[in-house]
Each structure stands twice: as structure tokens, then as C-alpha cells.
Amino acid sequence: MKVCGQNIRKIRRSKDLTQEYMAFEMGISQKAYSDIENSKVKINLDILTKISDILDIRPSDICSISHKCGTADDYEDKYQGLLEYMKKNNISIPKEYLEDTK
């Protein structure tokens, strides 16, 4: 994932943003943010999402493999499958999730 850290740095610099700004927006120290760019910590989905939101880009712009995580249609199929599984196994489903399926 070293490439991801390098991509983050490249995109951040292209937008004239500092590590201090990124760290502030993420609620972490500048050192912790620097560790992300220097690939000293693993980038999880939460970190990837926060950074891509701040930089106003897609997560796949940071890590090229993230586009393989799924498409909107894929998520919808998985969501419907999960709902069916929960119904079949008598697992309580919050009403707000059921309203979207009508």
C-alpha cells in the first residue's frame, strides 16, 4: 500500500494543502497523518474515505485497487440479499431499511 500513501501526498500537494490541514480535518496529529503518507500505517476504509472526502476525490483515485471493491449495482444486490437472509431467519430489521426496498 506504499503507492496509496504516495498518491495521497501527490494529490494533497496538487491541491496546495498541508499535512497540518489534512490532520486537522481528520482529527489526528500531523505526525499521525505523516505516517499515513509515508505508509507507516495501513490505510483502512475509514481513513481512505476521510482522506478522499477532504481531497474531494474518489477513493479509487488514491488506491487503484479500490475500484474493484464493488459497484452501486453490486451493493444493491448484496443489500437485497442481506435483507432476504434477515427475513428468512427472523432477524429484526429496522423500519428505515425496509422503507427503501418498496
Image (spheres, rainbow, N blue to C red):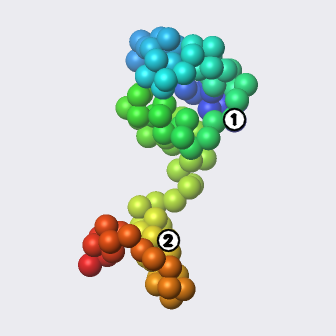
Of residue 49 and residue 26, the one placed in the foreground of this image is 26
The image quadrant that residue 34 belongs to is: top right
Residue 42, disc: 1
- Which residue ends up furthest to the bottom in the rendered image? 88
Is 99 rendered above or below residue 42?
A: below
At x 49%, y 71%, the residue is 78
Residue ID for mark 2 = 78
- Amino acid found under the numbered disc labelled 1: Lys
Residue 43 shows in this picture: yes
Of residue 68 and residue 23, the one placed in the foreground of this image is 23
Residue 25, disc: none
Quadrant occupied by the C terminus: bottom left
Is 39 rendered above or below residue 95?
A: above
Is 6 rendered above or below residue 52?
A: above
Residue 14 shows in this picture: no
At x 49%, y 23%, the residue is 27
At x 62%, y 32%, the residue is 4
Of residue 40 and residue 68, the one placed in the foreground of this image is 40
Q: Position of residue 86 (x, y in %)?
A: 50, 79
Q: Secondary structure at mark 2?
A: helix
Q: Secondary structure at mark 1?
A: loop
- Amino acid found under the numbered disc labelled 2: Lys
Q: Position of residue 9 (x, y in %)?
A: 56, 20
Q: Residues within 10 Å of mark 2 (few under 14, many from 20)?
A: few
At x 28%, y 72%, the residue is 99
Which numbered disc flags the more N-terminal residue, 1 or 2? 1
